[in-house]
Image (tube, rainbow, N blue to C red):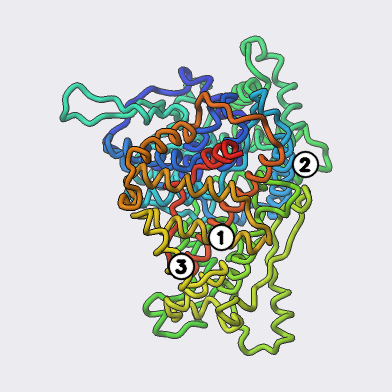
């Protein structure tokens, strides 16, 4: 959905529409799919032109992880119990698939155009443009930190808005979001806009025994009704439809504004057209019922499009209803029926549908995993990388080929070689990706064989529950051109220098760097690998996770850490040399590949029931520091 300009409208009219309050000792439903991105934007997008171009993609995931952790800590300090609600993968039956595909295709093209503009920014002039393509691992980091903090999470089956509202009404609490669409829903208590939620500085009460609170602004329909007397809750979904260009053509809305605007224009001054349009439509809707308003608007639509208009409005307004998470399991059971599983496994709930449902509930499957499971074409956002090289996402294709083996519905063991090939071709999975600067549909097929592992045609989702952990581990390693012996040797080597979680994270990181080199047949620049090693060492040493016997010159280590700290900060007064378009594109490509490889590893590891270490990129992956070190090395 999306009411164009409504967020700004609420912020610009805070005094008129919202009520200042202090929040503590309460439950709080959080629109998690929105808030994890808001926390990222807060760190990077709001610094404007002070940000260097080299800091845009990948960013400092360490700082992001710390920001997420501080967010949950301050909620706990104020005795606010958060409940995270995440968007789900199932398209609503009320939504037009054709319309959804059209939106995704249009959105995909706009991402490419934006990336092209960013690539041509003159860094020396401090130009800045907002980048909508975020690091692919953000949501994983947010969810992992929430789990560590003991925060309750709910995975909605559909878009989370209706589910979040239902939970908030059941708990009689507020919703925290930065999505103004929530003003449309029938929320008992209302919502809190994240931009007006001052969680960083809780208010300390006068006595130590009193619980601190967070200053915020409460937005509710009651506040809207006070500002626009006579407006009804029932008409709000129509208001949302009119300002959603995927539902009602903008020209129709503009005609409506031109028709009703002259009488109201004098009272609305010094505002943009978008804000003016919202004010005009809300004012016009006072005292009107939805059928009356729809009939008035229908007269502005060409006769041959009126039926389509009425159907679009009706379909959209039906989406404002609560969805059941039972839909989730029903959809999975249709695709992976339990009648193919032994009775003993059914009794112990070890069916593919139950297993995948558990991964969904923990959100251990990213968007491409969901699309694979539900047999949908995947529309992934383009990445900021080097357009002179094959797409950075290519490193994901081998793991995705294995994922399709694990997720296929039927065993191929009884098929002839010829029929197997036909079946594999028929079950190809399609992903939209960059090819020489343009987006194209590419096919990913089930892999038949893994080096150092063997054939895979006898495997499917029905054999996963009975597969030995050692076999799963071998499959995981083989997928990334690795094996257990190499892993043990690398762990022993890294333990000489590092300790704690940095040992496994460093080994995993360099396993993926090696994997990328094999898949792309192109060794990464040594400057990139060196910068990555120093970045890992910096964060390990900063948290006292190095083997001090190997570094007797403690004073030298401290001097090194002090020097690196300056370069790791988002903003500093250092100059990193003139812009080199070639090296910039190439390093962004390496960073993009590493993010993609991490995400692919996370997916395969989850499908293999987390047989290996779960990556925690937020403990060291500061792409800003990596990029700056490479410039310094040059």
- Vertical order, 376 against 552 (above or below): below
The answer to which of 40 and 361 lies nearer the viewer is: 40
Is residue 142 something that shows in the picture? Answer: no
Question: Element type at marker 1?
Answer: helix
Question: Element type at marker 2?
Answer: helix
Residue that badge 3 annotates? 487
Number of the front mark, 1 or 3: 3
Quarter of the figure with residue 260: top right
N-terminal-most mark, 1 or 3: 3
Quarter of the figure with residue 493: bottom left
The answer to which of 287 and 342 lies nearer the viewer is: 342
Question: Element type at marker 3?
Answer: helix
Q: In which quadrant of the rendered image does the N terminus lie?
A: top right
Q: Residues within 10 Å of mark 2 (few under 14, many from 20)?
A: some
Residue that badge 1 annotates? 600
The answer to which of 355 and 69 lies nearer the viewer is: 69
- Vertical order, 429 against 241 (above or below): below
Q: Residues within 10 Å of mark 3 (few under 14, many from 20)?
A: some
N-terminal-most mark, 2 or 1: 2
Give how far apart the Cα atoms at labels 2 and 1 are.
46 Å
- Vertical order, 565 against 81 (above or below): above
Provide residue 231's location: percent of width, then percent of height.
54, 27
Provide residue 77's location: percent of width, then percent of height.
27, 36
Residue that badge 2 annotates? 306
């Amino acid at each position: 959905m999306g009411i164009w300009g409504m967020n700004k409208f609420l912020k610009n009219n805070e005094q008129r529409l919202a009520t200042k309050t202090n929040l503590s000792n309460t439950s709080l439903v959080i629109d998690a799919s929105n808030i994890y991105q808001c926390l990222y934007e807060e760190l990077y997008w709001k610094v404007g032109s002070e940000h260097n171009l080299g800091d845009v993609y990948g960013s400092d995931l360490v700082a992001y992880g710390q920001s997420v952790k501080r967010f949950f800590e301050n909620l706990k300090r104020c005795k606010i119990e958060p409940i995270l609600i995440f968007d789900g993968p199932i398209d609503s039956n009320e939504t037009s698939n054709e319309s959804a595909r059209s939106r995704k295709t249009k959105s995909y093209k706009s991402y490419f155009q934006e990336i092209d503009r960013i690539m041509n920014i003159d860094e020396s002039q401090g130009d800045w443009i907002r980048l909508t393509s975020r690091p692919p691992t953000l949501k994983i980091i947010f969810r992992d930190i929430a789990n560590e903090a003991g925060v309750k999470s709910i995975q909605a089956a559909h878009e989370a808005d209706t589910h979040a509202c239902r939970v908030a009404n059941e708990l009689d609490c507020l919703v925290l979001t930065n999505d103004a669409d929530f003003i449309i829903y029938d929320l008992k208590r209302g919502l809190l806009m994240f931009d007006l939620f001052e969680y960083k500085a809780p208010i300390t009460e006068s006595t130590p025994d009193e619980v601190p609170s967070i200053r915020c602004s409460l937005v509710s329909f009651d506040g809207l009704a006070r500002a626009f007397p006579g407006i009804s809750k029932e008409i709000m979904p129509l208001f949302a439809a009119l300002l959603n260009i995927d539902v009602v053509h903008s020209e129709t809305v503009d005609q409506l504004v031109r028709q009703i605007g002259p009488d109201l224009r004098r009272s609305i001054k010094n505002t943009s057209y978008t804000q003016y349009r919202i004010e005009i439509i809300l004012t016009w809707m006072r005292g009107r019922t939805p059928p009356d308003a729809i009939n008035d608007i229908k007269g502005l639509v060409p006769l041959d499009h009126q039926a389509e208009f009425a159907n679009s409005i009706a379909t959209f307004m039906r989406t404002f209803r609560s969805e059941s998470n039972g839909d989730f399991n029903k959809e999975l059971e249709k695709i992976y029926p339990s009648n193919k599983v032994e009775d003993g496994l059914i009794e112990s709930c070890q069916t593919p549908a139950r297993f995948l449902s558990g991964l969904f509930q923990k959100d251990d499957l990213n968007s491409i995993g969901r699309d694979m499971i539900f047999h949908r074409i995947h529309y992934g956002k383009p990445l900021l990388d080097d357009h002179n090289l094959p797409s950075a996402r290519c490193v994901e294709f081998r793991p995705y080929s294995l994922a399709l083996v694990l997720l296929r519905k039927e065993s191929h063991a009884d098929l002839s070689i010829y029929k197997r090939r036909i079946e594999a071709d028929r079950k190809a999975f399609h992903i939209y990706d960059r090819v020489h600067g343009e987006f194209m549909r590419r096919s990913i097929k089930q892999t038949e064989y893994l080096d150092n592992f063997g054939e895979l045609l006898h495997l499917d989702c029905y054999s996963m529950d009975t597969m030995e952990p050692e076999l799963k581990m071998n499959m995981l390693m083989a997928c990334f051109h690795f094996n257990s012996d190499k892993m043990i040797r690398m762990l022993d080597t890294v333990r000489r220098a590092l300790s704690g979680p940095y040992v496994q994270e460093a080994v995993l990181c360099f396993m993926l760097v090696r994997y990328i080199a094999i898949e792309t047949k192109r060794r990464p620049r040594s400057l990139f690998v060196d910068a990555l090693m120093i970045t890992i060492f910096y964060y390990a040493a900063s948290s006292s996770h190095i083997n001090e016997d190997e570094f007797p010159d403690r004073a030298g280590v401290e001097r090194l850490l002090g020097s690196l700290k300056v370069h790791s900060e988002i903003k500093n007064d250092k100059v990193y040399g003139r812009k080199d378009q070639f090296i910039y594109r190439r390093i962004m490509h390496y960073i993009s590949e590493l993010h993609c490889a991490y995400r692919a590893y996370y997916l395969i590891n989850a499908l293999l029931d987390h047989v290996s270490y779960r990556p925690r990129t937020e403990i060291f992956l500061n792409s800003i520091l990596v990029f700056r070190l490479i410039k310094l090395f040059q």
